[in-house]
Image: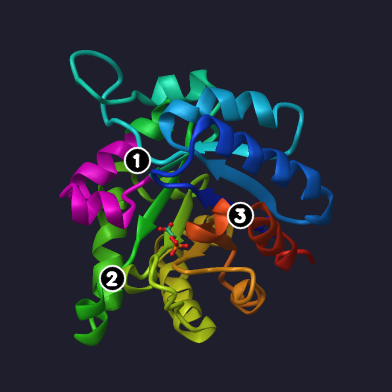
């Protein structure tokens, strides 16, 4: 069985005070989450503080982005080895906000994925279509192209220990969640695509759903066969909501 992963993507939110309150709140209710692995992805500067706060708990730490380079003259960048150094297990790569606001390409995302793996991080590779792409009926082509960039560079095996997050861009931060069936369709498409290359990888890889997942809709999404957890934005900023999503994955 694939252990569900509920990962909170805090995006560019918080302060030293508020992240501490949030983590303490999550810790206080963690016992209610019996099955899922819970992870938090704070902004870079709060990683060490959060690492200390979650020390000794089962909560995992992740970063929201990473450089594709190991070290050197790359002003403003953070290397994968620095993330492992401060205790990260996961790193999000190719989030749609990186792709659309900062113009990060499929190829650049794939090189970040490779760099993250090389440093021992588990990449959470985000894929997903824009609203106009869904309306054009090309969701599967878009997701396939985004996955192929990684498969071409790293081979399908690289996805065995990784996490994929299907995040329809039109559902992110909009309150417009994909229906469980809409999400399941794309998740099963992704798993079938991988199965055609390597059935073991397809069975193993965790495919999260992201896009306005919240305490109210998590259970029905998480009940779908190929949805192995969630990448949660807005609802991960409130301990009670984040925990409710975690408990919705209890089996
Ligand atoms: P949302 O964000 O839950 O606020 O829609 C999800 C994400 O961007 O990862």
Q: Please indicate whether residue 114 sits to the left or right of residue 43 in the image.
A: left
Q: CA distance from mark 2 to mark 3?
A: 27 Å
Residue at coordinates 38% horizontally, 66% vertically from top-left? 172
Q: Is residue 13 magenta?
A: no
| Residue closest to the eye, 52 or 89 | 52
In the image, the segment drawn in magenta is 93-114
Q: Say if residue 128 shows up in the picture.
A: yes
- Residue linked to disc 3: 238
Q: Is residue 237 above or below residue 144?
A: above
| Residue closest to the eye, 212 or 121 | 212
Q: Position of residue 50 (x, y in %)?
A: 59, 30
- Residue linked to disc 1: 113
Q: First in sequence: mark 3 or mark 1? A: 1
- Residue linked to disc 2: 129
Residue reaching furthest front? 17
Q: Position of residue 231 (x, y in %)?
A: 51, 57
- Secondary structure under tag 1 reads helix
Residue 178: image quadrant is: bottom left
Q: Is residue 122 above or below residue 104?
A: above
Q: Please indicate whether residue 30 sits to the left or right of residue 3 in the image.
A: right
Residue at coordinates 45% horizontally, 59% vertically from top-left? 165
Q: Is residue 243 above or below residue 15?
A: below
Quick one: quadrant of the C terminus? bottom right
């Amino acid at each position: 069985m694939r252990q569900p992963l509920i990962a909170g993507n805090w995006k560019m939110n918080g302060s030293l005070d508020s992240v501490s309150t949030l983590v303490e709140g999550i810790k206080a209710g963690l016992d209610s989450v019996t099955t899922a692995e819970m992870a938090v992805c704070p902004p870079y500067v709060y990683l060490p503080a959060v690492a200390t706060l979650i020390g000794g708990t089962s909560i995992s730490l992740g970063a929201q982005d990473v450089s594709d380079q190991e070290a050197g003259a790359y002003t403003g960048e953070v290397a994968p080895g620095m993330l492992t150094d401060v205790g990260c297990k996961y790193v999000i790569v190719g989030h749609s906000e990186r792709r659309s606001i900062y113009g990060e390409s499929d190829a650049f995302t794939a090189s970040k994925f490779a760099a993250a793996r090389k440093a021992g991080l588990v990449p959470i590779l985000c894929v997903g279509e824009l609203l106009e792409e869904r309306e054009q009926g090309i969701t599967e082509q878009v997701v396939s192209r985004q996955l192929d960039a990684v498969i071409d560079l790293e081979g399908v095996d690289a996805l065995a220990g990784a996490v994929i997050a299907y995040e329809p861009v039109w559902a992110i931060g909009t309150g417009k969640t994909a229906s469980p069936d809409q999400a399941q369709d794309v998740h099963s498409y992704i798993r079938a695509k991988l199965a055609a290359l390597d059935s073991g990888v397809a069975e193993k890889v965790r495919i999260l759903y992201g896009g306005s997942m919240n305490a109210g809709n998590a259970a029905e999404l998480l009940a779908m066969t190929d949805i192995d957890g969630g990448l949660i934005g807005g609802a991960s900023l409130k301990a009670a909501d984040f925990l409710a999503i975690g408990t919705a994955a209890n089996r």
